[in-house]
Image (cartoon, rainbow, N blue to C red):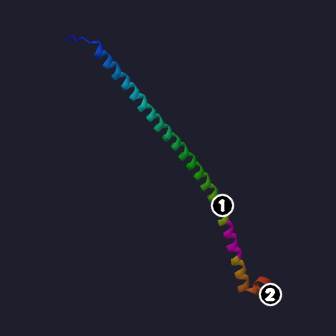
Amino acid sequence: MIRIVTGRRLRALSAQCEQAQTRAREVQEQADQAYSGYTRALYDLTARAEEAESDAEIIREEAEQLTAALDAAMAELEAARQELANPAAARGVGA
């Protein structure tokens, strides 16, 4: 079947084509903005996660130092308790 396209029909098709292209550009801009926003959010979240990991490592190191200091203090306390409980043995008297 052969269809004859009139000038009016051709202009209408051309106008529809332009509208479709305009809409496609609008949708592409929206998609680009959404992608940009998601990429920015991903970058920010990655940076925050890396910072949190670094902070956690620093806190772990500080906790280990504090645990070592507490262990040393507990050992000193135990030695002082034993000295107080048995003062003669601590001074070397009574042997």
Question: From which residue to which does the magenta span run?
Answer: 68-76
The residue under label 2 is which amino acid type? Val
The residue under label 1 is which amino acid type? Glu
Camera-side residue of 47 and 16: 16
Q: Looking at this view, name the residue that lies furthest to the bottom.
A: 94
Residue in view at x 34 percent, y 18 percent: 14
User: Could you tell me residue 7's position as x and y percent?
Assistant: 30, 12
Residue at the disc numbered 2: 93
Camera-side residue of 65 and 30: 30
Which image quadrant: the N terminus? top left
Q: Is residue 12 left or right of residue 55?
A: left
Residue 37, placed above or below residue 3: below
Image quadrant where residue 70 sits: bottom right
Structural crowding at the residue carrying mark 1, measured as other residues with C-alpha within 10 Å and reported as few (<14), some (14–19) or many (≥20): few
Residue at the disc numbered 1: 62
Residue 60, placed above or below residue 32: below
User: Could you tell me residue 50's position as x and y percent?
Assistant: 58, 48
Camera-side residue of 64 and 78: 64
Which image quadrant: the C terminus? bottom right
Residue in view at x 57 percent, y 49 percent: 48
Residue 69, placed above or below residue 56: below
Q: Earlier in the sequence, mark 2 or mark 1?
A: 1
Q: Secondary structure at mark 1?
A: helix
User: Could you tell me residue 5's position as x and y percent?
Assistant: 26, 12
Q: Is residue 25 left or right of residue 71?
A: left
Q: Secondary structure at mark 2?
A: loop
- Asked if residue 15 lies in the magenta stretch, the reply is no
Alpha carbon of mark 2 to alpha carbon of mark 1: how far? 43 Å
Image quadrant where residue 59 sits: bottom right
